[in-house]
Image: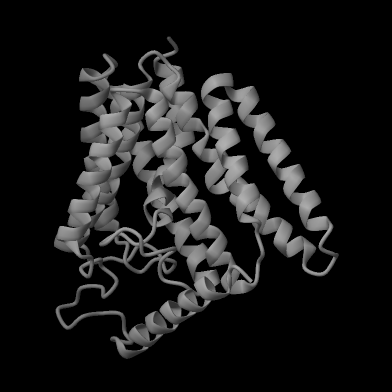
Amino acid sequence: MEHRDPAARLRARANGTAHDEAAGDPGGQHPAGKPSGIRTGRNLPAAIGVGLALGAAVIGTLYTQKALFLLVLVAAVGVGVVEMIRAFGVRDIQVPMKLQLTGLAAMLAGAYWGGPIWLLGAFTITVLVLLCERMFKGAEGYVRDAAGSVLTSVYPSLIAGFVPLMLAKPDGSDRVVLFIAVTVCSDIGGYFAGILFGRHKMSIISPKKTWEGFAGSVLACVLCGSLMMRFLLDGQYWQGALIGVVAAVCATLGDLVESVIKRDLGIKDMGSLLPGHGGLMDRLDSLLATLVPMWLLLAAFLPG
């Protein structure tokens, strides 16, 4: 079966993670009193290099040809879909990859050229096709596989369709840049604040997160959002600050949701494509969670 080899690799990675955790400090504290979950193990130079390369690809396509950026978006989210499907294979949840990728392309293209109605229509047809395709394979495991297929169609595919909706606006490129920049600032602010000041764990779901790191995320998002809203989109400082607060909260929740999914599947990362980051889905989690709220706020603040 097509998931067998990726599943084996994911199981091996999960086993290695469990071994490392078992060998660590059982109390969850380093001798200095700092929570052991703080993200000090990231390969920072590699992470920065990958982030700069991704940023250059986004900016370079956004401000030249929007359709070209749409292709980059389809490719990036498509890799995330593949990672999700392979991760589900660890639990023997079978999701048809070709149908998922076809549905993703239809949703993103429909959203950009047809608007919300076409996005919803493409999503609905994709789900119906997936349910019918699985039906012909028998009743055994139908609900399990169908649930995995629908989840993948929603997260990330349907949610990602709001990027083309944002992009289709006359100032769509600026809106997308603001959305990405503010969300990325959540990760950057949380990472450095967590390393420098992190003491109090935020959630048992993700022991790496601290309340000090979350405060850093909020501060970074508010600063970035208020400045970019004012000088990039000619909005108000308070509007950008509100966007920053919402982005920080949603990005954190999105990261936690991804952590729950990975814990249930027994894996550490969704993939290993990006050095210092993990897989594409490990970077898309916060972006997906902030996308729709930010789209709504921008639509309310900048209806034109």
Quarter assignment of residue 275: bottom left
Picture coordinates of residue 22 (x, y %)? 37, 88
The answer to whether 291 is drawn above or below residue 202 in the figure is above
Q: Nearer the viewer, residue 113 or 191?
A: 113
Left or right: 303 with respect to 59?
right
Tell me if 146 is positioned left or right of 55 in this view: right
Percent coordinates x, y for residue 278 in the rendering: 34, 62
Q: Tell me which residue sits at (57%, 60%) in the image.
A: 85
Q: Residue at x 25, y 79 (%)?
A: 29
Q: How many marks?
A: 0
Residue 141, compared with residue 72, is above or below; it is below
**Quadrant, the N terminus:** bottom right
- The colour scheme used to paint the residues is one colour
Q: Position of residue 134 (x, y in %)?
A: 77, 57
Q: Residue at x 47, y 58 (%)?
A: 258
* Closer to us: 185 or 279: 279
- Please say if 297 is above or below 82: above
Residue 102 image-quadrant placement: top right
Locate residue 135, reporting x and y percent: 83, 56
Q: Quadrant of residue 46?
A: bottom left
Q: Residue at x 60, y 55 (%)?
A: 97
Q: Work out whether residue 242 or residue 49 is closer to the camera in this orientation and state it.
A: 49
Viewer-proximal residue among 68 and 290:
68
Q: Is residue 235 left or right of residue 166?
A: left
Residue 157 in sight in this render: yes
Does any portion of residue 296 appear in the rendered image?
no
Residue that sits furthest to the bottom in the current view: 23
Quadrant of the rendering where the C terminus is positioned: top left
